[in-house]
Amino acid sequence: MSGRVTIASVRPWLNAAALLCFSIVLATFVLFGQARAAEPGAVARTEAKRVLILYSFGREFRPWSEYARSIKAELERQSPWPLDIQQHTLLTARFNNPGPEAPFVEYLASLYQGSLPDLVISIGAPAARFVQRYRSKLFPDAPTVMTVVEERLVNRHDLTDNDVVVSVRNDFLAAFQNILRLMPDTKTVAMVIGASPLEKFWIDEVARELKPLGDRLAMIWYSDLSFDEILNRAAKLPPHTVLFWGMMSVDAAGIVHEGDIALRSLHAVANAPIFSYQEAFFGGSSVGGPMHSTAETTRKTIDAAIRIFRGEKPSSIQYQPIGFAAPKYDWRELQRWRISESRLPPGSEVLFREPSIWQSYRWQMLLIAAIILVQAGLISGLLQERRRRRLAEVESRQRLAELAHVNRYSAVGEMTTSIAHELNQPLGSILTNTETAELMLKGASPDIEELQHILADIRRDDLRASEVIRRLRSVLKKTPFETTDIELNDTVREAIGLVAAVAEGRGIALVYTPVLVDLHVKGDPVQLQQVVLNLIMNAMDAISDANTAKREISVWTVRAGREAEVNVVDTGPGLAASDLANLFDPFFTTKQQGMGMGLAIAKTIVEAHQGTISATNQPAGGARFTIRLPLLRW
């Protein structure tokens, strides 16, 4: 039993081991945390960074307001730490005669007493000098980034190890050479600049820098004018003059001008183009050219701030002065002042270019073009189809006319005996009357009155023969299908006159009853006569084949509303019910010797006249054919 080990016996040892392991892990974390805290630049990521941004003139004074907005936005975007940003404006710098700064200093001292900022960012030269003068009283140990300060305005004697300078360099010579490049005929430049101490400083600097151009350009300074007077002069500038916008914080009358309101007012009345060297004034008013880049200055300012927050010593952070960026131009201003893009320097960027109609509505115009092309194709196809249809209609009418002409010859052939008989009668009568007149003239005393009667009979018979021949010629003549205004009663009467003798020879009574009003239709008289002839000839064949007791054909015309009707009724056996559906089909016939083309031609002719033809059986026996044609007048 003495060699046996139990759980109870070793439990104290296990508890001691676990406690030892926990202590070692805890010590490791503590030592690691201290080591991380000892690393250069190591910070508590949850601690907020207090940043003071000091403006030179005010929050809305350009160009510094645009730099401040860009710097603030980028700092908030890039900072890994929470930020507490406070912004203040140095109002004393905006006046022609600056007042005392002590009240503002006391205000800042009371505001930041016991809670100094982690970083001070000054915007512009006046704010930078204010920080240098009062840093010992306000925030002696706070690092400062002096940004957007022109290189010539940096007070280097008062710089400390806590200062970082992000300076810019104004190259006025390059700006004015750009003007001459774009507008070589320029002779005068009107300089728009305010009356504050800072702006007055630049009058001498600009004049000094532009000495190399003294023989080409004359300078006019507006620093001693009120802005209203500047607007008046800008509206009446002589030819070959341009305006150069320097800055307008306060005019000679002491009126403060914030934002870009003054520049927009100048642009509205000026009769000459406006140039500037600040990107903050670009876009809507100035032509453009080489300018300071807000983005480049912002980038370096944010780089300095982040490096200071990470523990880097400000004096070790140094930047070269920032010059003008690549030239940028406003396409709208180039168009307004007729400045050719070929004069722009290489590497220039043209902004605000208005897209062409093709660029703006590319897909819409392509769709419209496609629709137009499709429509043009459809219209072309329809025109071709219309042309082919017209040719087909003309050809069809020609074929119809030829077929109808053949059909008329066939009908006339059937009427040959009747026609010969109808001609022989007047010709025989003429011969008899002539012989009688000759015998009377041989006598001693011829009866003149009787001779006159004989001559009258000869004339009547001649006219009768001539009428038969005329009707025959009208039926047999070959003419194209032509529609005219015809009187339907007369047309039917002439057709009946052609077959009256045939009906008489066959012992068939042909009765015609016209309506008592004129029936004017648009049609071809020869074609319509042929239809009537076909129907009457068919009716006579039907009566002859049936050997019916009553042998009669009735033809009458009536007016039915807006249509004229021609009815042909016979007393034959009628039509078989099975034949009614196919009666007008080509080559369908009920005759042993028939070809089946007569009624088909008749239907084609009637339909060509915009009419209809139908066939029915009479209740008392016989068939009835009805032709309906539209009236011209009703």
Image (cartoon, grey):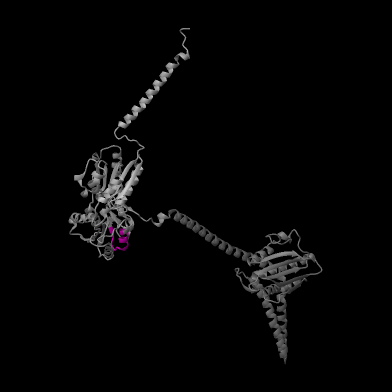
State whether residue 270 is above or below residue 329.
below
| Residue 337 horizontal side relative to residue 590, left or right | left
| Residue 207 horizontal side relative to residue 297, left or right | left
Q: How many marks?
A: 0
Question: Per the image, is 271 magenta?
Answer: yes
Res. 23 visible in picture: yes
Question: Per the image, is 425 magenta?
Answer: no
Query: 109 or 289: nearer the eye?
Result: 109
Q: Position of residue 458 (x, y in %)?
A: 70, 83
Q: Position of residue 180 (x, y in %)?
A: 24, 57
| Residue 364 horizontal side relative to residue 566, left or right | left
Q: Position of residue 260 (x, y in %)?
A: 32, 56
State whether residue 440 is above or below residue 576.
below
**Which quadrant of the view contains residue 216?**
bottom left
Query: 615 or 451: nearer the eye?
Result: 615
Identify the residue shown where x is 60% and y is 68%. 481
**Which quadrant of the view contains residue 543?**
bottom right
- Start and end of the magenta stretch? 262-274
